[in-house]
Image: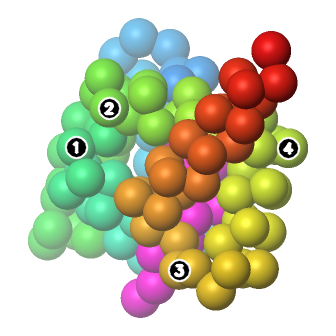
Amino acid sequence: MKRDWDLIRQILFAVEAAEANEKISDNDIAGCTPENFHHNAILLTEAGFVHAMVLQNLETTLIESLTWEGHEFLDSIRSDATWDKIKSTAKEKSIELSFASIKAIETHFLNAIIALL
């Protein structure tokens, strides 16, 4: 199963918007299959972006909260315009999306904006 960057972004937004002690599952993401949510939630957990309960025998994941790194990453891709620009730049330059490439492209845009000030 592939990593789905748009779903990952949706999950991060849902976790951020959740009330205290509310856990996010596939039921909280419109149009998402349980398998796809579980796979991408595990990736977010392994990357250290979320705290989650992974129930392997049920193939489900309940995401409890964002970590500091999760908040930082979400902040870097929060803007729809920035997110669209990151994806289009990666495609234009034939760069596969990864956490590192997303961060590098976002940093490049941020530096360009700061240089204009």
Residue 47 as seen in the image, left or right of residue 108: left
Location of residue 32 with respect to 85 vertically, above or below:
below
Characterize the magenta stretch by its predominant secondary structure: helix
The amino acid sitting under disc 3 is Glu
Numbered range of the magenta stretch? 1-13
Residue 96 as seen in the image, left or right of residue 50: right
Q: Specify few, some or many for label 1: CA neighbours under 10 Å numbering under 14, 14-19, or 20 or more.
A: some
User: Label 4 to label 3, Cα distance in Å?
Assistant: 19 Å
Q: Are marks 2 and 4 in contact (CB under 8 Å)?
A: no
Q: Are marks 2 and 3 in contact (CB under 8 Å)?
A: no
> Does 95 appear in magenta?
no
Q: Mark 1 vs mark 4: which is more N-terminal? A: 1
Q: Quadrant of residue 90?
A: bottom right
Which secondary structure, mark 4?
Answer: helix
Q: Are marks 1 and 4 in contact (CB under 8 Å)?
A: no
User: Label 1 to label 4, Cα distance in Å?
Assistant: 25 Å
The amino acid sitting under disc 4 is Ala
